[in-house]
Image (cartoon, rainbow, N blue to C red):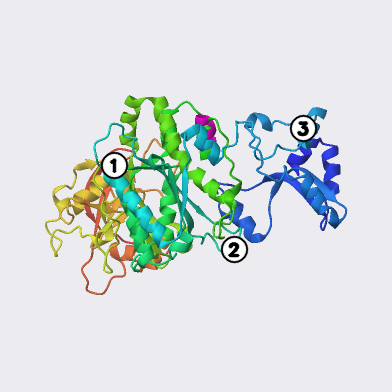
C-alpha cells in the first residue's frame, strides 16, 4: 500500500488501509504489479499470478462494499476504472500530499474510447482516414476459403516478381494471437497460435486464418500434414518464401517462431524471407526518439499516425469460437497497422534513405523445432522454449546474403555439428593433437620456446590444425585454464607477476629453477584422480595404456603465450598428504 498511502497522504492513507480486512468485498482500481518482459523471471510474471489465482496490485483507489447486492451498482459506477489502466509517464508519477493531488487520485480515468493521445482507432476510422477505402476482412476456416486465399497469394507472388518502381509496392502485415498463459487454463505457456492475421494492403484485404480450427498443434516435424494443413501450407509458402514480398510487424519474429513451434509439421512456417521488424526500422528512422516512445505497436502508432490503439482484447480468449466482433476488429487492426506504419515512416525518411536502409533490415528467418527429450541438442544449440515442451533454434540472416547451414547435432559417437549461426563446430575432446599414433611429429615439437600469440585460440588452433578441416571451428571453453583433447590436454598459465600486490589464493609458482610449476585443479574437475581430466593429466588410466600428453603454454601478465612443450603432472605431498 505504499503507493496508495503516498497518494492520499501519510495520515489519511494508513487510516484507509485499516478498513481493508480479509473477507471484505471490494472494488479496486490499480495497476497489476507484473513484469511484462519477465526480467525477474516466472515469479513476477502474469502467468504466475493467474495460476495462483491471485494478483499483486498497486492500488490507487478502492471502495468497500457493505452488502453483496451492491456489487452490480458498484461495478457500474467503476466501469470506467475497470478498463485499461492509463499510461503514466515518469513526470506524472511524482506525487505530493496536496489537496489537489488527493482529489486527482480519486478522479476516475476516462472511458477506453477517450484518449489524450488522439482518437481511438477503429477499423472504420482506419479505412476512411488512413487507407481511403474499405477493407475486406475474410475469416478463413474452411478448405474452400483456403483454396481461394491460396490463389490470391499465388497471384500476388507472381505479380511481385514483375518489374515495379517502388521497393514497398508489395508489403503485407503479419500478426498472431494465442490464448494468454494461465488466464483460461493451468497450462504453462502451452497455448498454440489460435489466429494468424495477414493484411494485404494492395488488395485491401485482411485474412484472419483460424489456425485453431484448421491445424493440429504439437505434432513433431516428421509427422505428415493432412489435406487441410497441406492446403494452408501451400498458400502460406507462396508469400513466406517470396523475397519480393515484404513481411512486416511489431516483434514479428516472435510471431513466426511461435507459429513454427505451435505446428512443427507444417513446412510453411519453418522459413520466412524478406522480413522487416518495425521496431528496428523505427530506431533507424527516428534515432533521436526515446525507446519508450516506440517500444510497442500502440506507442509507435501514436507517434507516427497520431491515433491511439486499444489493447483491451489482447488478453481475451482466442481459442473461443466464434470470435467476438471486438476480437475480429482488434485482430484486423493489429495486422493492418504495420504496413501503414512502414509506408508512413518511409515517406517521412525519403526514398533515398529507405533504399539505403531497407537492404540492411530485410532479414530471413529459419526455425528448427525440437521437443524436451532432445536435451543435449537443446543445450548445445541454445534452443529456447516456446510452446509447451517444444523448443526452437532460431536463425536469421540478411535476405540478400547466402543462407547459413541448417543447425544439426553430431552423431551418437560425436563429431562435427552445425550451430545456430550455420557454422560447423567440433568439441575439442573429439580432436587429436598428435600427428601420429605414437605421438611423434606433433606440431608443438617445432614450436617449443616460440611466441604463439595473445589468445588461447591461436595456441589450440596450432595444435589441432592437422586434424581439422578449414571449415570446422574448434569448440572449447576459452575462459578455462585447460582445454581437453582426445589424446591430451593443453594447460594455460599466467606466470607470477612480481609487481602484483595482491596474492592469488591459487598461485602459479616456479620451483626448482623453473623445472617445476604449481598448478591447481578444482575438486569437480579432479574427481578423486579418476575423472577424464585426471586421466588426460596421466592419472588413473588403464594399466599399460599410453600416457596422454600435457602441453604447456605460459604468458606473463597479459602478454603473448609461449609454447613450453610437453610437461608431466604429479600430485605434490603436502604435510604427509597428497
Q: Secondary structure at mark 3?
A: helix
Residue 116 at least partly seen? yes
Where is 145 relative to 507, above or below? Answer: below
> 10 Å neighbourhood of mark 2: few (<14), some, or many (≥20)?
some
Pointer 3 residue: 104
* Residue 326 screen position, x and y as percent: 59, 49
Q: Earlier in the sequence, mark 3 or mark 2?
A: 3
Position of 309 with respect to 237 (left or right) is right
Pointer 1 residue: 160
The alpha-carbon separation of the residues under discs 1 and 2 comes to 43 Å
**Residue 553 or residue 330, whichever sits in front:** 330
Question: Which residue sits at x=33%, y=36%?
Answer: 169
Q: Quadrant of residue 186?
A: bottom right
Where are the magenta residues, as a range?
299-305
The alpha-carbon separation of the residues under discs 1 and 3 comes to 55 Å
User: Residue 185, which numbered label?
Assistant: 2
Question: Which residue sits at x=35%, y=48%?
Answer: 509
Q: Secondary structure at mark 2?
A: loop
Q: Secondary structure at mark 1?
A: helix
**Residue 563 or residue 421, whichever sits in front:** 421
Where is 81 relative to 324, above or below? Answer: above
Q: Do the CB atoms of the residues marked 1 and 3 lie less than 8 Å apart?
A: no
* Residue 384 screen position, x and y as percent: 43, 55
Residue 270 at least partly seen? no
Position of 480 with respect to 433 (left or right) is right
Amino acid at each position: 500500500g505504499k503507493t496508495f498511502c503516498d497518494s492520499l497522504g501519510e495520515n489519511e492513507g494508513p487510516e484507509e488501509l485499516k478498513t481493508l480486512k480479509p473477507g471484505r468485498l471490494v472494488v479496486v482500481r490499480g495497476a497489476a504489479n507484473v513484469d511484462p518482459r519477465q526480467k525477474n523471471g516466472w515469479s513476477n510474471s502474469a502467468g504466475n499470478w493467474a495460476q495462483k489465482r491471485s494478483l499483486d496490485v498497486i492500488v490507487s483507489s478502492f471502495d468497500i462494499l457493505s452488502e453483496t447486492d451492491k456489487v452490480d451498482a458498484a461495478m457500474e459506477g467503476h466501469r470506467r476504472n475497470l478498463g485499461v489502466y492509463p499510461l503514466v509517464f515518469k513526470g506524472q508519477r511524482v506525487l505530493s500530499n496536496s489537496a489537489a493531488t488527493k482529489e486527482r487520485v480519486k478522479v476516475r480515468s476516462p472511458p477506453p474510447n477517450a484518449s489524450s493521445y488522439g482518437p481511438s482507432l477503429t477499423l472504420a476510422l482506419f479505412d476512411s482516414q488512413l487507407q481511403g477505402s474499405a477493407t475486406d476482412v475474410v475469416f478463413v476456416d474452411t478448405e474452400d476459403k483456403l483454396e481461394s486465399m491460396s490463389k490470391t497469394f499465388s497471384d500476388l507472388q507472381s505479380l511481385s516478381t514483375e518489374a515495379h518502381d517502388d521497393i514497398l509496392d508489395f508489403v503485407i502485415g503479419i500478426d498472431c494471437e494465442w490464448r494468454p498463459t494461465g488466464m483460461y487454463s493451468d497450462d504453462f505457456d502451452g497455448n498454440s497460435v489460435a489466429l494468424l492475421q495477414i493484411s494485404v494492403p494492395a488488395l485491401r484485404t485482411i485474412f484472419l486464418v483460424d489456425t485453431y480450427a484448421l491445424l493440429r498443434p504439437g505434432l513433431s516435424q516428421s509427422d505428415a500434414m493432412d489435406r487441410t494443413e497441406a492446403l494452408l501450407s501451400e498458400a502460406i509458402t507462396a508469400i513466406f518464401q517470396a523475397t519480393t514480398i515484404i513481411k512486416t510487424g511489431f516483434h514479428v519474429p516472435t510471431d513466426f517462431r511461435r507459429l513454427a513451434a505451435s505446428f512443427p509439421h507444417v513446412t510453411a512456417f519453418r522459413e520466412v524471407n524478406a522480413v522487416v521488424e518495425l521496431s528496428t526500422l523505427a530506431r533507424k528512422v527516428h534515432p533521436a526518439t526515446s525507446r519508450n516512445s516506440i517500444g510497442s505497436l500502440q506507442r509507435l502508432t501514436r507517434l507516427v499516425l497520431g491515433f491511439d490503439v486499444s489493447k483491451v482484447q489482447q488478453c481475451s480468449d482466442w481459442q473461443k469460437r466464434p470470435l467476438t466482433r471486438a476480437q475480429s476488429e482488434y485482430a484486423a487492426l493489429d495486422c493492418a497497422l504495420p504496413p501503414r506504419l512502414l509506408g508512413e515512416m518511409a515517406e517521412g525518411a525519403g526514398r533515398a534513405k529507405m533504399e539505403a536502409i531497407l537492404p540492411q533490415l530485410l532479414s530471413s528467418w529459419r526455425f528448427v523445432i525440437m521437443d524436451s527429450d532432445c536435451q543435449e541438442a537443446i543445450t548445445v544449440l541454445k534452443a529456447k522454449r516456446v510452446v509447451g515442451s517444444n523448443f526452437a533454434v532460431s536463425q536469421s540472416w540478411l535476405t540478400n546474403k547466402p543462407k547459413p547451414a541448417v543447425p544439426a547435432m553430431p552423431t551418437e559417437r560425436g563429431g562435427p555439428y552445425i550451430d545456430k549461426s550455420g557454422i560447423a563446430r567440433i568439441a575439442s575432446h573429439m580432436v587429436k593433437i598428435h600427428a601420429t599414433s605414437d605421438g611423434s611429429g606433433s606440431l608443438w615439437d617445432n614450436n617449443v620456446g616460440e611466441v604463439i600469440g595473445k589468445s588461447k585460440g591461436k595456441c589450440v588452433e596450432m595444435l589441432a590444425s592437422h586434424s581439422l578441416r578449414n571449415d570446422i571451428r574448434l569448440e572449447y571453453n576459452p575462459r578455462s585454464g585447460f582445454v581437453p583433447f582426445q589424446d591430451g590436454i593443453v594447460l594455460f598459465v599466467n606466470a607470477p607477476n612480481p609487481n602484483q600486490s595482491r596474492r592469488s589464493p591459487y598461485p602459479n609458482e616456479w620451483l626448482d629453477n623453473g623445472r617445476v610449476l604449481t598448478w591447481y585443479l578444482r575438486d569437480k574437475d579432479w574427481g578423486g584422480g579418476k575423472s577424464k581430466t585426471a586421466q588426460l593429466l596421466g592419472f588413473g588410466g588403464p594399466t599399460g595404456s599410453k600416457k596422454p600428453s600435457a602441453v604447456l603454454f605460459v604468458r606473463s601478465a597479459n602478454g603473448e603465450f609461449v609454447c613450453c612443450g610437453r610437461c608431466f603432472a604429479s600430485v605434490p605431498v603436502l604435510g604427509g598428504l597428497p
